[in-house]
Amino acid sequence: MRVTKITILLVLALSMSACSMFRSKKETIDTMPEDRLYASAHNSLEYSDYSAAEKAYQRLIARFPSGDVNEQAQIELAYAQYKDNKPDDAYSTINRFIKTFPTHKHADYAYYLRGMINFDRTGGVIERYLQRGSSASTRRDQGFNLTSFDDFSQLTRRYPNSAYATDARQRMIFLRNQLATFEINVAEFYLRTKAYIASADRAQYVIEHYQQSPQTADALAILTRSYVALDRKPLAEQSRKVLALNYPNHPYLTDDTWPHSPSIWRKAIPFSGHH
């Protein structure tokens, strides 16, 4: 009798073990039901295993090509790619989502994420830590800045009461100032090389397009200097009056040689913004 009991227990144990092994073999991203596959992908995302999350979300989207879970998976896939430092993939995924589901309940977040993807491509890691407004990042191609600004602008325009709108507006201010600084850097370069028409054009562009940026004062000063050099005295006097009225403490008003060319030693300092 004792031998029989032991035999039965062994058979049951082996049977349970076999069932467990069989079940674990079945539970893969290729065989999991939709709810468990989404839970697995989301769990990987929560634990910052972005590569595993990306793989699971992609399989879910392929296996279950419609429905609420599929739509949510697309958003979370874009976020996983963004966090995994794959901005091109993330931008493509979220852009496709916005085009496919323009009225989705989380469309505001999709616009916000799209803006964030390019926002994080607007400068290097060192420059972000240094927080240098006149750093080399403002001298780079401003394509990502412009695209990010446009994405945040669409969010605030379409969804002004969104939970993400306030942060988006703050980032737009930062991007606007970056874009204006870039134009001022170029205008100063033209001024130093005596390309006065070009420096005037750049300064005028800042005045017209970035009126609320701090760089407007510099733009007025550069515009005044350019008009003086071009012997356009009435225009120079007009722009100087506007500068004095709105920015009475600007250094140009007491030093008509402003802005000064950076010294050769200043140019040699890495990340100084004068290369």
Image: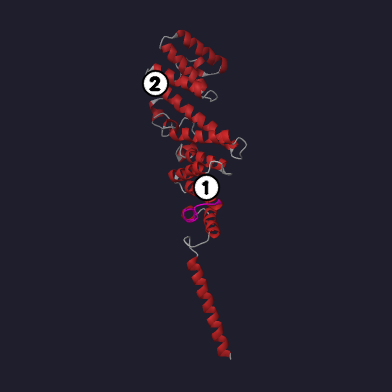
Q: Element under label 1? A: helix
Determine whether 35 is above or below 255 in the image: below
> Residue visible at 42% across and 25% down?
186
* Separation (CA) of disc 1 from disc 2: 45 Å
Give the crowd class for mark 2: few <14, some 14-19, many >=20 residues within 10 Å.
many
Q: Is residue 85 left or right of residue 112?
A: left
- Asked if residue 206 shows in the view, the reply is yes
Q: Which amino acid type corresponds to the residue marked 1 in the rendered image? A: Ile
Q: Which residues are magenta?
A: 57-67
- The quadrant in which the C terminus is found is top left
Magenta region's main secondary structure?
A: helix
> x, y percentage for residue 165?
59, 37
The residue that label 2 is drawn on is 190
| Cβ–Cβ under 8 Å for marks 1 and 2 | no
Residue 75 - label: 1
Q: Nearer the viewer, mark 1 or mark 2?
A: 1
> x, y percentage for residue 119?
49, 38
